[in-house]
Amino acid sequence: MDIGMEPGNEWVDSRYAHVMRRLNVSSALGALGIHVLIALSVHDKLRSVLWVLGSLAIMVPVNMWITTVLLEKRGVALAETIRLAANIVAALVVNSAIGWPVTVWLWLPFIAITFDGSKRLTNWTALIAMCLAVDTLALVDHVPWIAPLAFTALAGFCRVIAETRIGIARDMLERSERQREALNEAHTSLHIAMASLTRESRARERAELELRNSQKLEAVGRLASGVAHEINTPLQFVTNSAQFVGEAVDDLLQAFDRVRSDPTREGVEKAASDIDLDYLRTNAPEAVGLIIEGVNRVSAIVASLKEFAHPGSAEKTEVDLNHSIETALLVSKHEYRYIAEVKTELGTLPAVRCHPGEIQQVLICLVVNAAQAIAETTANGERGLIVVSSFVSANDVIVSVSDNGCGIGESLRDKVFEPLFTTKLGTKGAGQSLCRARSIVVDKHGGKLDFTPRAGGGTTFRMQLPLSAKGIEDKRAA
Amino acid sequence: MKSVLFIDDDSMVLRALERTLRPACKEWRMVFALGSSAALATLEAESFDAVVSDLSMPGMDGAALLARVRAKSPKAVCILLSGGARSGLTPVDGVADEVLTKPCGAKDITACLMRHFEALG
């Protein structure tokens, strides 16, 4: 029977060889024991038994050595031949020494259960041929027929036991090998999955960082261009008015010179009409008024910008939130002025401890989002309405920003505060991330930022900031 | 006499322009329109040799307005006066012959208009 192994399966090979070596020894000793017992009980010949034992004591190691070491070095054919020859010689020596033919039979099962290397049993044909040869010889030699029959049967029996055991061992080995491979595979795929997870999470972290940076830059850029517009418009009329006033002053000085040289009534009238004095009289003060107005507008914007751009100090400070709201509205004016009218309903508030720059970012974010929501629905220069209100509720200050814009669809409500959330894929982009706003309010100030759909369309965002102990005291005092 | 329409959504800008451009009124007829809807009404009624418009305005913005002027009278000189909100705007964008950036003095505006009128002959 050939139960050969697939080549290359080294682990199974080595385990198998190990089991086989043990099987060799135990089978051989088992057979030996049985033979000795039979010999002792049937013939009662101690000298013969000692001979047999001695020969076995020599031949077992010899057989072992041949089937392991020699076989590996010289190949199967030579090893088996030597083994067979050695066993026959041993049998003959013992037989002739003690004149007891029974010993010849001892070698039949012994040969039957020895192995061709540690991989397969010598095949059945060879075994049967060998048994036939030995049996024939024995019968010719007038050995009683029962002896060859018994030992041949014993040889076959041992052979079957050995095969069964090899089968079981091999089956178990294969099963454990399969398990080992499955485990190995699982381990490998786990490794791969873990590596890709790590890669993904790193990539995501990087993407989030980049997004946050680009959002910051974008917000600054938008603000800068909006603020440029807010400043350049007053500068336009300031420039024009200053030029006008300058020319008017030149005209007046020239007229004055002419009047000084010709102080007659006609001279004065002529000078006045040449410079269009009546026009100047109404327009020059108005132009000066415009200059002052323009300069005031610019300085208000610059003042709020300065406040906005103030590097966030690590410490929280007491802040008038209403003032922050007004500043945020001024700075983000360009975002909503053509889209919506802004109404403020600001209640009396105690000072709130917060990082003013960051809270202003949140307020600007809410206002810009409201404006964008309105821009989604309105067209043709129609303007929506943004209502910003502030009030105190229990121990919190609440600022709400309501718009009558497009509202937030049911399916998007859970995603609004996610880092990558945006409904605008165009140039307006995710510049005003509500995620960052939420993180500022919740993580840095222990407040809340949420929203509710507004009846009749639109959304109301609510920022809730806790009052400090001092704020609560102020509130009681008020 | 050339006619020029000035459009801006800030009345103060228009008033200041009107005053500072007063010396030019001997050469040009100047009309000032507050916001794009007023400008559209004026443009319905008459046509102009040149239109100088603010860029950012509620409703129709300057670029759209000038595109409409272009469609109606292809020979009109179209000038955009940008507040700087949209940087990088160039005449190549097709709507304007020239883009001026606020703040912009009277001399710059008149020089720009003269240049374009002369080019037209």
Image (cartoon, grey):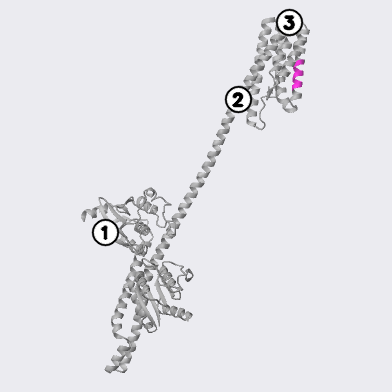
Vertical side of A305 occupied by A105: above or below: above
Residue drawn at point x = 37 percent, y = 56 percent:
A314
Rate crowding at label 1 as few (under 14), some (14 to 19) or many (20 or more) other CA atoms within 10 Å: some
In the image, residue A84 lies in the stretch drawn in magenta: yes
Q: Are marks 3 and 2 in contact (CB under 8 Å)?
A: no
Q: To which chain does the residue with label 2 belong?
A: A
Could you tell me which quadrant the C terminus of chain A lies in?
bottom left
- Pointer 1: what residue? A346
Part of the protein shown in magenta: A80-88
Which amino acid, mark 2?
A: Asp
Question: Mark 3 sits on what residue?
Answer: A144
Res A400 → quadrant? bottom left
Q: Amino acid at mark 1?
A: Leu
- Where residue A258 appears, as percent x and y from the top left, is 32, 92
What residue sits right under mark 2 in the picture? A171
Residue A92 included in the magenta stretch of the image: no
| Residue density around tag 2, few if under 14, some if 14–19, many if 20 or more, within 10 Å | few
- Whichever of callouts 1 and 3 sits on the residue coming sooner in the sequence is 3
Subunit that carries the residue with mark 1: A
Residue B13 can be seen, yes or no? no
The front one of A204 and A96 is: A204
In the image, residue A439 above or below residue A271: above
Image quadrant for the N terminus of chain A? top right
Viewer-nearest residue: B101 or A355: B101
Q: CA distance from mark 1 to mark 2?
A: 84 Å
Between discs 3 and 2, the one toward the N terminus: 3
Placement of A152 over or under B45, stated as above or below: above
* Cα–Cα span, label 1 and label 3: 125 Å
Q: Of callouts 1 and 2, which one flags the residue occurring earlier in the amino acid sequence? A: 2
Left or right for B120, reference A477: right
Magenta segment, principal secondary structure? helix
In percent of the image, x 39 and y 49: which residue is there?
A: A415
